[in-house]
Amino acid sequence: MRLLFDARYIRTDFHDGISRYSAELAAAVWAAASRRDVEVSFVICDDAQRALLPEGAPVIVINPPTSLREPLASRLLNRHRPDVVFSPMQTLGSRGRRFRLILTLHDTIYYRHRTPPKNLPWYVRLGWRLFHLSYVPQRLTLNGADVVATVSRTSADQFAAVRLTKRPVVVIPNAPQRLAEQLPAGISVVPGAENLVYMGSFMPYKNVETLVRAMRDLPGRTLHLLSRISDSRRAELEALVPAGASVVFHGGVTDAEYAALLADRAVLVSASLDEGYGLPLAEALELGVPVVATDMPIFREVAGGGALYAPATDAAAFAAAVRSLDDPALHAELVATGAAHIARFTWTRSADILLETAAGLAKS
């Protein structure tokens, strides 16, 4: 079987969620392909992406996924005679294809929060907003595939609830990076609940306000806000910091800095009102750090019994959950349960699901 893996979403500056998913899954698929007699090539749009793919992996160069030529991408790939093409997004044009196609929709969050990523060209941002005004364009896009992939059972259920596609939906789960590998030699996780760590954007639905307000009831502890933030958004949150509370704006951190902060007597926190997945929760559990998060289906799927849950807008409940982790027995139980839960999510397992799905399509 000849499989083409669309690796054009791998960023060459820093990983976002789609980029990391693409790179990690690509590496796992490459590692698994040889034992399954699968020939894999990777589709790229920037020669710098070669360095982020497995060494020696063959590549095919075509247009970027934001190009106006994207609707014709399948016609370009036909000449390479693939049996199956997999894309970690859903934008790859399917018209005129002569191969089986797996497109991916990670979640439906942009139907509820339509603001597109700011790094996209203006015409793509405009099209993004128009695309998400109705489910009809998405249905037409996804029905152009043979199988639709997504990253969680929660997302698959959401697709079914709005009848988003007629095609079979397969869950190819996201998986956490191993932050322990980012820690300096000899450094390990120190248990505790003195530091609250938030990793994520500051868009309104992320509801960081609840985390800041919770610090009123958490004297002697520090809330670490790790991501880049605009001056105006920082000023909004700073105005909410309770008197005497400790809130640190890091303005962006490396993976190594992220790991070190989580390893230092920390709890990973998220009061998000809505979420497509929740990768920081998975990363914390994999490192052996407990989580306090909003009580909603996707977070329960990702974190399971490794988290304590609270209503999204109840700052007092978040604070109480953090304080409860001062109990060493509860802390240890949460860490152990979380580690067992997150161990089910690995890139090897996700690659196997993708390759099994592709093999089934190639035979049909």
Image (cartoon, rainbow, N blue to C red):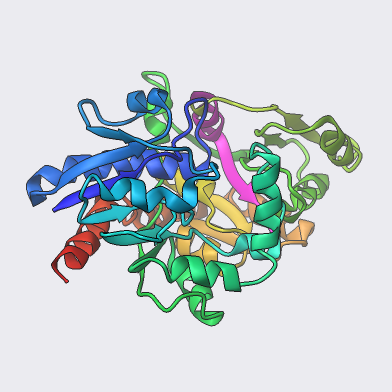
Q: Which of 90 and 208 is in front in this view?
A: 90
Q: Which residue is drawn at 59% across and 26% down?
A: 253
Residue 257: percent from left, percent from top: 54, 25
- Kindly indicate the quadrant of the structure image that contains residue 188: top left
Residue 204 in view of the camera:
yes
Looking at the image, residue 288 lies above or below residue 166: above
| Residue 141, magenta (yes or no) | no
- What's the magenta region? 256-274
Q: Is residue 21 left or right of residue 211?
A: left
Q: Is residue 34 left or right of residue 228?
A: left
Q: Nearer the viewer, residue 180 or 22?
A: 22
Q: Residue at x 33, y 39 (%)?
A: 43
Q: Nearer the viewer, residue 137 or 224?
A: 137
Residue 19: percent from left, percent from top: 46, 39
State how many labels appear: 0
| Residue 271, magenta (yes or no) | yes
Q: In this view, does 276 lie to the left or right of 209?
A: left
Looking at the image, residue 156 lies above or below residue 62: below
Assign the C terminus to one quadrant of the image: bottom left
Residue 275: percent from left, percent from top: 61, 58
Residue 87 in view of the camera:
no
Q: Which residue is drawn at 63% across and 48% down?
A: 269
Q: In this view, does 78 lie to the left or right of 143?
A: left
Q: Which residue is drawn at 70% across and 27% down?
A: 251
